């Protein structure tokens, strides 16, 4: 028998059968996978989580600040919490793209034939997305502070609003996870993100106070989840948060998660090529 | 007591929308054997493998792997099988080494053991030099080896190879064949789908030919060859214009359809007995048809395949016409 073959038999000889990985083990392994893939593409992470947020914050502050609020300093106090929401919203589509890419490549089939807790594959991808959300938020906030933004509720307000925006991005990501598991083509996801996310972001209170908008737009803006999130982030960071408004926001986000997270798991389980 | 079959399929049906892909398929694979599933493109081979490996749910029928139901006991089935697909199922965004560590950990190895196993398999499959490179940049043969290595991290009791050598060059193909033989020596049962008859001939203990959603023939490669007659006679005529006449003579003497080749002077027919072939040649010369050349040979699996699938397709057409 040739040498490579005997090496192969030696490699095969381990007849031990390791125990089925526990759910946390499987999740950790998928987090590791996402991390290895992301760190191999550090340039993309830097562009999405650092460069884009910085560029857009600068554009909106200096281009529109004077026109909307009279001065860039005033506008930044209003804009920055909204920009935190804007930054992560544009990134929520990635979970859908990541899942869709896995399914299109054959690797999905291998995951499916392994005896593991299947949602681990989605959660691992999601975990790394949360890291990039956090990097995006820290960039936005850090640059905002350099430009003169002052959180009126201090550091606890900053922390609470960051947590809220993270929760918002987490819940939105589940919607895109479901879409990623349903669409036929990856490109449809990008199209959808332009058709759905951008109108949602601009018909919100991210960039301008809703009292300046025509009446008919009022309900659209008021029930827009982007508005809910940015109004709550603004309230938390400036210490004007009311219990009722916060409860509404948290319940809305909770509902999105309660619907779309189990749905994503279900779609993933049922998915076949 | 009879040993539990590695694969036991009864009355398996699967449709995509209105299109029936599998129409009551039966299959039994004994442990420790290599089983070849042959069929043209679109015969339902990949769908069958998908169902056997828990990727797809059957519409009806019973599918058992080592006695375990693929739907109800999917997890237990997954612990005993390995799958390497037609399109290598590796993570193209990761290095070869990371791929094996990933699948090792997902198979339940500790981080440390997964690394050791990854190195062992990289070495065994000749991938150590390329271990740090992204699998997306591997050649077709390397990717296929990585794919098979990943399926062998925990030596599976049953390995599904879905067209393992499609698109590989001859050298990589024979490498894959060596790997399959080594696995079988080790006690793994292999179910192999292929379009290459040579591959089934080389590797498989038994072969099922699939056509129109069910098994149309089953047996050892030798049995299959014997089933269509002991051989065939190939004839090249001196005058192509006489081929029509020659065809009639062969049909009368051998009581079988002759096959007309692309070359207008050539035709062939199956013969179950060499004496009949001699008789046919005599009759041809008595009818004034001169043969340039003739030969008598064992049928190749290719001919078996054509005969079977051709016959089955004709049977289908007849059935439809009668309805």
Image (cartoon, coloured by chain):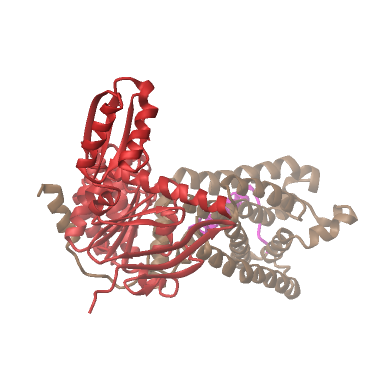
Q: Position of residue B182 (x, y in %)?
A: 18, 55
Name the image quarter holding the C terminus of chain B: bottom right
User: Which region shows up in magenta?
Assistant: A128-152
Residue B129 visible from this viewpoint: no
Name the image quarter holding the N terminus of chain B: bottom left
Q: Is residue B108 above or below residue A227?
A: below
Image quadrant in which you'd find residue B9: bottom left
Q: Quick one: which residue is furthest to the front in this view? A: B286
Residue A163 shown left or right of residue B39 in the figure: right
Image quadrant in which you'd find residue B126: top left
| Residue A140 is inside the magenta segment | yes
In depth, the one of B273 and A263 nearer the eye is: B273
Residue A113 shown left or right of residue A236 in the figure: left
For chain B, give the colour: red
Q: Position of residue A197 (x, y in %)?
A: 68, 51
State the brown chain: A
């Amino acid at each position: 028998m040739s040498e490579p073959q005997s090496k192969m038999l030696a490699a095969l000889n381990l007849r031990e059968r390791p125990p089925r990985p526990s759910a946390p083990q499987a999740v950790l392994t998928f987090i590791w996978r996402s991390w290895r893939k992301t760190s191999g593409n550090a340039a993309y992470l830097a562009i999405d989580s650092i460069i884009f947020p910085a560029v857009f914050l600068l554009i909106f502050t200096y281009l529109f600040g004077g026109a909307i609020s009279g001065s860039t300093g005033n506008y930044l106090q209003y804009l920055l919490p909204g920009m935190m929401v804007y930054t992560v919203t544009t990134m929520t589509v990635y979970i859908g793209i990541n899942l869709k890419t896995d399914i299109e490549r054959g690797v999905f089939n291998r995951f499916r034939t392994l005896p593991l807790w299947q949602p681990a594959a989605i959660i691992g991808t999601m975990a790394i997305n949360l890291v990039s959300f956090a990097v995006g938020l820290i960039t936005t906030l850090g640059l905002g502070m350099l430009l003169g933004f002052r959180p009126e509720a201090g550091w606890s307000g900053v922390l609470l609003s960051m947590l809220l925006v993270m929760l918002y991005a987490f819940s939105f990501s589940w919607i895109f996870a479901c879409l990623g598991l349903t669409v036929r083509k990856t490109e449809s996801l990008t199209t959808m993100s332009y058709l759905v996310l951008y109108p949602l972001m601009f018909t919100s209170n991210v960039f301008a106070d809703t009292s300046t908008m025509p009446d008919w737009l009022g309900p659209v803006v008021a029930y827009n989840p982007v508005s809910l999130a940015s109004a709550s982030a603004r309230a938390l960071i400036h210490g004007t948060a009311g219990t009722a408004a916060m409860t509404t926001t948290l319940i809305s986000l909770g509902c999105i998660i309660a619907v779309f997270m189990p749905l994503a798991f279900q779609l993933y389980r049922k998915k076949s090529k | 007591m009879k040993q539990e079959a590695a694969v036991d399929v009864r009355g398996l049906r699967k449709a995509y929308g209105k299109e029936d892909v599998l129409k009551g398929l039966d299959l039994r694979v004994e442990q420790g054997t290599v089983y070849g599933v042959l069929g043209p493109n679109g015969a339902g081979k990949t769908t069958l493998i998908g169902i056997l490996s828990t990727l797809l749910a059957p519409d009806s029928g019973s599918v058992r792997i080592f006695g375990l139901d693929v739907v109800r006991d999917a997890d237990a089935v997954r612990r005993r099988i390995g799958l390497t697909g037609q399109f290598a199922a590796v993570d193209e965004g990761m290095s070869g080494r990371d791929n094996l560590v990933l699948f090792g950990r997902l198979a339940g190895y500790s981080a440390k053991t997964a690394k050791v196993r990854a190195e062992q398999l990289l070495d065994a499959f000749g991938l150590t030099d390329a271990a740090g490179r992204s699998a997306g940049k591997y050649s077709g043969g390397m990717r296929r080896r990585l794919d098979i290595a990943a399926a062998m991290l925990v030596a599976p009791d049953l390995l599904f190879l879905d067209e393992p050598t499609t698109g590989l060059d001859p050298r990589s193909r024979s490498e894959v064949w060596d790997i399959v033989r080594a696995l079988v020596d080790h006690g793994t049962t292999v179910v192999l789908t292929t379009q290459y008859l040579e591959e089934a001939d080389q590797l498989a203990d038994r072969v099922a030919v699939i056509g129109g959603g069910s098994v149309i023939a089953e047996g050892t490669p030798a049995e299959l060859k014997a089933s269509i007659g002991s051989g065939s006679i190939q004839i090249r005529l001196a005058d192509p214009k006489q081929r029509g006449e020659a065809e009639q003579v062969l049909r009368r003497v051998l009581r079988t359809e002759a096959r007309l080749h692309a070359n207008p002077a050539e035709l062939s027919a199956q013969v179950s007995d060499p004496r009949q072939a001699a008789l046919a040649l005599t009759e041809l010369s008595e009818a004034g048809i001169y043969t340039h050349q003739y030969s008598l040979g064992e049928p190749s699996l290719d001919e078996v395949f054509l005969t079977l699938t051709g016959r089955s397709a004709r049977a289908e057409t007849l059935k439809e016409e009668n309805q």
